[in-house]
Image (spheres, helix red, strand yellow):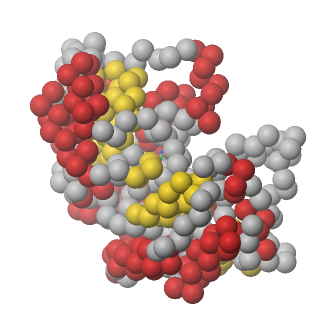
């Protein structure tokens, strides 16, 4: 039987069984649901997109997968060329892996080894944010700050190798002046912290982080697994502030299959590139650069450009602001909107208990967590469908 994620199996309610999916819709045997979660924020083009399906079918005729150890192939080469030209600055070097968590692990390993390759073995510390989420593997749990998910780490006590700070410039400056000789990197989910509760903060914080990283020679890592591909209303937050390492996942493959990439800038790549074999990056997930995943990712980027997805995202934000304007309720702490993300934070988690079933009955799939009721819709959603998602949220508060 299936052991489901983040659930107490003894008390979990039965999951909805999906039998078909097309566009923004999920179909159960008896209901049609707008997926307001985009299958964990990844299905940006909607389900069963004809051009994405065709890209996979085309590649499948040749082969589904070959390893990147000692071999290479056109799908991975083309995607890397595309990312190199499409991503900002000198983010040119693409290291693939099979999930966002692993891609973050790779970024952290790069940052640590970058300094080790220079003989600076004392740089073992990572600076991260309060409420950070970077994945569910052990090192990503350690740099995360997500007691609700990762309380298992309590068994180890507090890690001496991670410092967490709030998104305040004064805290940032203090941390750098205190720890800079031991830091290898500062890692952030830029502008929008997803699993930590759709927390939003100002680009000025990231600009200051870039300056301090330059001043103290510390690497800046953007985990854009959730924010990449337009979710914040920016194509990438890296378009505003350039990191040394960028991590992409989730929307990267249009939601078709697990794949992710850690993209390094020139300086980082140069730190590994020499005659000493021990300076190589020793990593290699079995399914890195999977040919089906690469071909669908490339097509996904082409669609994003050709169909001007950034204007679709601006439209989603406009409609969301219009619909949520003046919507208040004493049980609501804050309504936050950024690009293709809206979050209603309530004071008491009990307030949104039962919302999932309420939404189901009104044709919307939603998955609130803790105190957060949110939507991150597929970008192809039309106005009427988006209004339905938002009205369902408002109706919940009005009806009780
Ligand atoms: C989802 C997520 C991850 C982990 O990605 P997986 O593919 O689930 O391993 C890492 N970082 C951020 C910011 C995420 O939202």
- 250 or 169: which is nearer to us? 169
The percent position of residue 400, horizontal first and vertical second, equals 75, 67
- The picture places residue 191, in percent across and down from the top left corner, at 35, 52
Furthest-left residue in this view: 215
Visible residue check, residue 221: yes
Q: Is residue 312 left or right of residue 258?
A: left
Vertical arrangement, residue 348 with respect to residue 212, above or below: below
Confirm whether residue 42 shows in the render: no
Describe residue 371's horizontal placement relative to residue 302 as left or right.
right
- Up the image or down, 183 lies above or below 323; here it is above
In this rendering, is residue 267 above or below 302? Answer: above
Looking at the image, which is closer to me, 43 or 71? 43
Counting from the top left corner in percent of width and height, residue 181 is at 21, 17
User: Image quadrant of residue 29?
Assistant: bottom right
Position of 226 with respect to 205 (left or right) is right
Q: Residue at x 49, y 61 (%)?
A: 335
Residue 241 position within the rendered picture, expressed as x and y whole percent measured from the top left: 22, 51
- For image coordinates 50% across by 69% down, the residue present is 44
Q: Is residue 297 left or right of residue 376?
A: left
The residue at the point 29 percent across, 31 percent down is 171
- Total number of numbered labels? 0
Q: What residue is rendered at 55% in x and 14% in y?
A: 157
Observer-nearest of 363 and 286: 363
């Amino acid at each position: 039987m299936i052991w489901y994620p983040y659930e107490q199996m003894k008390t979990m309610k039965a999951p909805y069984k999906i039998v078909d999916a097309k566009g923004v819709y999920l179909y159960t045997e008896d209901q049609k649901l707008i997926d307001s979660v985009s299958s964990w924020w990844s299905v940006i083009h909607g389900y069963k997109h004809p051009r994405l399906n065709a890209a996979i079918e085309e590649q499948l005729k040749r082969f589904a997968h070959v390893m990147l150890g000692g071999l290479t192939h056109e799908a991975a080469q083309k995607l890397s060329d595309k990312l190199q030209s499409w991503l900002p600055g000198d983010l040119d070097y693409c290291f693939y892996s099979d999930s966002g968590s692993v891609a973050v692990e790779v970024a952290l390993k790069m940052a640590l080894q970058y300094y080790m390759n220079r003989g600076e073995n004392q740089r073992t510390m990572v600076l991260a944010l309060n409420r950070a989420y970077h994945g569910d593997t052990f090192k990503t749990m350690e740099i995360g700050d997500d007691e609700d998910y990762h309380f298992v780490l309590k068994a180890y006590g507090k890690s001496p190798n991670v410092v967490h700070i709030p998104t305040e410039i004064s805290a940032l400056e203090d941390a750098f002046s205190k720890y800079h000789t031991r830091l290898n990197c500062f890692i952030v989910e830029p502008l929008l912290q997803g699993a930590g509760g759709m927390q939003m903060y100002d680009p000025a914080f990231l600009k200051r982080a870039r300056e301090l990283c330059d001043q103290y020679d510390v690497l800046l890592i953007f985990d854009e697994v959730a924010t990449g591909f337009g979710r914040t209303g920016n194509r990438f937050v890296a378009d505003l502030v350039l990191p040394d390492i960028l991590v992409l996942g989730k929307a990267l493959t249009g939601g078709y299959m697990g794949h992710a990439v850690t993209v390094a800038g020139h300086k980082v790549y140069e730190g590994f590139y020499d005659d000493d074999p021990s300076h190589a990056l020793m990593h290699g997930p079995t399914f890195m650069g999977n040919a089906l995943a690469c071909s669908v990712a490339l097509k996904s980027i082409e669609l994003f450009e050709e169909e001007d997805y950034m204007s679709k995202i601006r439209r989603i934000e406009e409609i969301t602001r219009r619909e949520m304007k003046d919507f208040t309720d004493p049980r609501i702490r804050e309504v936050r909107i950024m690009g293709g993300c809206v979050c209603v934070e309530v004071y008491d988690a009990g307030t949104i208990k039962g919302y999932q079933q309420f939404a189901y009955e009104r044709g919307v799939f939603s998955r609130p967590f803790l105190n957060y009721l949110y939507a991150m819709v597929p970008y192809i959603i039309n106005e009427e469908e988006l209004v339905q998602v938002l009205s369902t949220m408002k109706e919940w508060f009005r009806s009780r």
